[in-house]
Amino acid sequence: MKAIRGAITVKADTAEEIKKNVRLLLTKLTEKNGLTAENIVCIMFSNTSDIHSYYPAKAAREVGFFNCALFSSIEPDIDDSLPLCIRVMVLAETEITPKHVYLNGAANLRKDITKKLNIAIDGPAGSGKSTVSKILSKRFDILYLDTGAMYRACALACENAGIDCKDEASVQAFADSVDITVKYENKAQKTYLNGRDVTEIIRTPHISMMASVVSAYGCIRTKMVELQRKIAKENSCVLDGRDIGTNVLPAAEFKFFLTASPEIRANRRLAENELKGFNQSFEDVLREIKARDEQDTGRKIAPLLKADDAMEINTDKLTEEEVANEICSVIQGKI
Ligand code: DC
């Protein structure tokens, strides 16, 4: 069962205006969400207290919603509330991600669910980016794009083709034939290399190091950044990476840069690796983290860097939930 929200304003408190706009709101909401009257369990309306002429629920029944439960109520008078406004919540039996519908200026009521959001989260390996990004994508019900996975898939492509990833000329000659795509299944990102799902096998420590090497090359970055920008243009999403705020989406409204000490990051990575069954000592992981930091910050093209307008959060003493809470409150405060 899903709850789908919507609202609309009417020009005047007349039965005709209310009927017309309730019909419009319900038509758009059902069309956008692929619903029929049969999927809908109940429709609840609330309207501002300046509407007296007609029950929105009665208007809904008249336009064909006979079988679901219908309910209308009046909201308390709140200063600054949008006048002549009808809000709706539709409960429906569906698996889709709800598409909320705000019409006739009512979008201002819920910018958090109607506005296109691109959230950039950058930082070094182990700073908590991916877990925090996943929490944010759930809270805002938007996509999560793990851009590192795309560079990992490029590294795997080199490995599979027997190409030395340290040899830029060979990687460049081969780069055009590498086909990386990103798909979403049940809202989770799947990364494909030449049509094959490589989501899981790119998570090894070896591929991490190789990804850091190939991601320094312009021939790889140009292709990946183009794909990242396309996904961000078409969707509300949270993107994590190294150069999202500085290079991929320099105009993003929300930019965060997560940091943590190398030791803390190595400990986090060690715990993750243990769960995945990779046997590495703390010293090995710390060495790799430091080597990657050096490679990612030291490269010429789009290095790991905090954007001037990004908010820096040191995650040493914070849980991922706490970091996500801080980011959420910054975003909620601005929209
Ligand atoms: O986030 P990650 O560990 O999966 O990233 C793997 C490597 O990819 C990382 O060491 C640097 C590179 N990368 C990048 O250069 N730019 C990004 N936006 C994301 C990752």
Image (cartoon, helix red, strand yellow):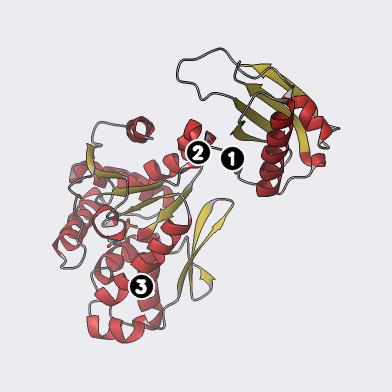
Under tag 3, what secondary structure? Answer: helix
Quick one: which residue is furthest to the top in this view? 76
* Front in this rendered view, residue 232 or 77: 77
Q: CA distance from mark 1 to mark 3?
A: 33 Å
Q: Is mark 3 within 8 Å of ligand 1?
A: no
Q: Is mark 2 within 8 Å of ligand 1?
A: no
- Coordinates of residue 195 in the picture (x, y in percent): 53, 74
Report crowding for label 1: few under 14, some 14 to 19, many 20 or more residues within 10 A (C-alpha): many
The residue tagged 1 is 100
Q: Earlier in the sequence, mark 2 or mark 3?
A: 2
Residue 113 is tagged as: 2
* Front in this rendered view, residue 296 or 94: 94
The residue tagged 3 is 223
Q: Earlier in the sequence, mark 1 or mark 3?
A: 1
Q: Is mark 1 within 8 Å of ligand 1?
A: no
Q: Quadrant of the N terminus?
A: top right
Under tag 2, what secondary structure? Answer: helix
Badge 1 amino acid = His
Is 232 above or below relative to 62? below
